[in-house]
């Protein structure tokens, strides 16, 4: 999030505020009745986006609004000062003797002090109420605009993100080997990390072993596939000097297509009623033709006998 604040009356300087791109909060509410009945309250999961670091406590559950230290100090000073002025004015009005040559204000001075103190205290209270309403507005906007999902949807998002990361890891390994040619495991690791740093300014520890294992499982390694999975774990027996190469785009497409067809069964074809009706129609025609020919034969015989 980029903010701008004026350094002078004519120019504005941008300020970069640290912001969390994604935040997932997992919490459980405490209930005295459930605790007494030995019941466990459900767990809630919330997901938010683009939350500034300074406003992180806004998305926390059961957030209570309280007066800040500065507001509390201002209100306390105003109350103490008002009490002191009121008591001093009362003492002067009731017990102190009037000075010679001084005008006696009487109760009007006490009323002026009381009004001044009331205005100061009212200003502090109104300021606190305004800050409270502003905070509630910030919480409402954050929960409404920046809330992405909750509960089951958050887990679906995490699963999809993990699958996407695994796919991007495999795709990056294939792209690097396809564009740069054969490489060892260490060279592939360094090249992928440099590519991510150069293109996206991100320092990532690339899992080159997982990428090569997935390329082998998909049948995309043309050279070096026999060195993967020869030890106790996947890729444990691979030599660091083994050079890996990938197949071309047509071979990769065919290999992935065959894997997809093997994983997804083809639906069975069902015979429609029209086809069954069409197959039965010629049989009826043949039977009708046979009966018609038999009738013609009987008619010819009867005609010969009559003659």
Image (cartoon, helix red, strand yellow):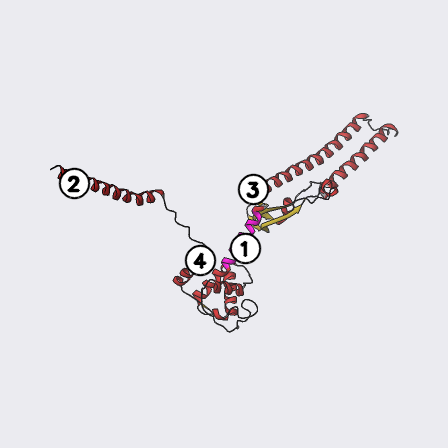
- Look at discs 2 and 3 and give the one toward the viewer: 2
Q: Which comes sooner in the sequence, label 2 or label 3?
A: 3
Q: Which mark is residue 145?
A: 3
Secondary structure beneath label 1: helix
148 or 72, nearer to the observer: 148
Secondary structure beneath label 2: helix
304 or 170, nearer to the observer: 304
Q: Which comes sooner in the sequence, label 4 or label 2?
A: 4
- Look at discs 4 and 1 and give the one toward the viewer: 4
**Residue 161 magenta-highlighted:** yes
In the image, the segment drawn in magenta is 153-168
Q: Which comes sooner in the sequence, label 2 or label 1?
A: 1
Spatial CA span between label 4 and label 1: 24 Å
Q: Please name the residue that numbered disc 1 is placed on.
A: 162
Spatial CA span between label 4 and label 3: 44 Å
Q: Which mark is residue 262?
A: 4
- Look at discs 4 and 3 and give the one toward the viewer: 4
- Look at discs 2 and 1 and give the one toward the viewer: 2
Secondary structure beneath label 4: helix
- Magenta span main SS: helix
How dense is the environment of label 4, judged by Cα within 10 Å: few (below 14), some, or many (20 and up)? few
Spatial CA span between label 2 and label 1: 88 Å
Q: In the picture provided, is 239 more to the left or to the right than 253?
A: right
Q: Please name the residue that numbered disc 2 is placed on.
A: 301
């Amino acid at each position: 999030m980029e903010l701008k604040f004026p350094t002078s009356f004519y120019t504005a300087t941008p300020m970069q505020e640290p912001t969390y791109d994604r935040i997932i909060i997992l919490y459980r509410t405490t209930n005295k009745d459930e605790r007494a009945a030995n019941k466990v309250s459900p767990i809630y999961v919330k997901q938010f986006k683009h939350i500034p670091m300074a406003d992180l406590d806004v998305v926390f559950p059961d957030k209570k609004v309280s007066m800040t230290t500065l507001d509390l100090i201002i209100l306390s000073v105003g109350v103490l000062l008002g009490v002191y002025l009121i008591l001093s004015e009362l003492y002067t009005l009731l017990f102190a003797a009037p000075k010679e040559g001084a005008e006696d204000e009487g109760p009007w001075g006490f009323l002026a002090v009381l009004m001044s103190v009331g205005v100061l205290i009212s200003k502090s209270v109104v300021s606190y109420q305004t800050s409270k309403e502003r905070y509630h507005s910030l919480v409402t906007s954050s929960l409404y605009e920046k809330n992405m999902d909750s509960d089951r949807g958050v887990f679906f998002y995490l699963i999809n993100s993990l699958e996407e990361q695994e796919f991007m890891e495999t795709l990056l390994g294939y792209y690097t080997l396809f564009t740069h040619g054969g490489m060892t495991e260490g060279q592939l690791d360094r090249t992928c990390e440099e590519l991510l740093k150069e293109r996206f300014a991100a320092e990532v520890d690339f899992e080159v072993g997982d990428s090569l294992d997935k390329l082998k499982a998909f049948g995309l390694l043309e050279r070096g596939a026999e060195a993967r999975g020869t030890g106790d774990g996947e890729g444990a027996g691979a030599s660091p000097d083994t050079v890996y190469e990938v197949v071309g785009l047509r071979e990769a497409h065919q290999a992935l297509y065959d894997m997809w067809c093997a994983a997804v069964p083809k639906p069975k074809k069902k015979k429609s009623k029209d086809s069954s009706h069409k197959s039965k129609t010629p049989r009826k025609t043949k039977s009708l033709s046979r009966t018609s020919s038999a009738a013609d034969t009987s008619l010819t015989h009867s005609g010969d006998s009559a003659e």
